[in-house]
Amino acid sequence: MFFSRSCATGSAASPFVPAEDDVFLVSYPRSGNTWLRFLLGNYLSGQKMDFFNVHAFMPDLDENPEAVKQLACHPRFIKTHSPFRPDLNNVIYLVRNGRDVAVSYYHFYIRTKKVPKNFTFAAFADAFAKGRVGYGLWNNHVESWLENPPSRFLLVRYEDVKAKPVDELVRICNFAKIKVDLPRLRSAVEASSFENMAKLDAAQPRRGIVPKEKNEMFVREGGTNYSSYFDEAMNAEFLKAHGAAMRRLGYL
Ligand code: PPS
């Protein structure tokens, strides 16, 4: 039913209304949402995901609601960075250590020229701790979902996907009521490896961005090395704002 599924275009006339079986891939930015979409897309689509077709298979509700409305496959997998909204069910909420999110977001801000190249991490960390970045306080985003989980809700940690991608993908498939085919799943994990996605990222520049160095790549580091960015003061400031969610998610 799901493999080689065709996501043929339907009508775009009506406003977005969630279908009962829609599955939402929800995360604060820079938490690994694109990786999750590659994993699922490579598993389900029968095609090789890349940085263009992934948006057609699993569109972004915030950026392109029309593409979501035009999806004719079921269940629809829909990406969003939205904080809690009550009309979404079947939510896979992807989290990542907030400090790694801050580091990744910092480089993304430079990549997309939201801040100049010489903007310091200290200044960004200060803005992040105060919620003065795109999606506001990381803590609030996480708590908004953890405090109000819809009836069908799956919490997935980026670090767990890194450590045991096959197991986590099985969990996700079970949650989304998708049949599990282990050999196929392992191939999807391989096709979506950091190295393979980084190669595709380099071969497919987007939005006029031509990265000049590794930190300007979209698939940049994929790491958990925040400690080389945060000094003691930044750490204290970060934990003052985000300690509750960090503790709750087992990151402290
Ligand atoms: S966005 O801009 O909000 O859509 O970003 P998002 O896709 O959620 O997150 C980007 C980070 O995910 C990392 N990434 C990966 N990590 C491990 N393995 C794979 N295959 C992978 N693909 C993407 C990506 O490198 C970004 O993290 P950083 O730390 O910047 O490298």
Image (cartoon, grey):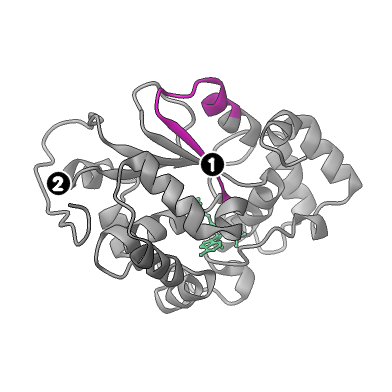
Q: Is residue 50 above or below residue 154?
A: below
Residue at point 55%, 69% (across, down): 217
x and y percent of residue 79 in the render? Answer: 38, 45
Q: Quadrant of the C terminus?
A: top right
Residue type beneath disc 2: Ala
Residue at point 30%, 47% (across, down): 178
Horizontally, residue 61 falls left or right of residue 14, namely right
Q: Is residue 252 above or below residue 50?
A: above
Residue at point 50%, 20% (across, down): 148
Mark 1 Cβ and ligand 1 under 8 Å apart? yes
Residue at point 89%, 43% (across, down): 233
Query: Which residue corresponds to mark 1?
Result: 28
Q: Mark 2 vs mark 1: which is more N-terminal? A: 1
Q: Which residues are magenta?
A: 143-158
Query: Between 233 and 197, which is closer to the camera in this rendering?
Result: 197
Query: Which residue corresponds to mark 2?
Result: 72
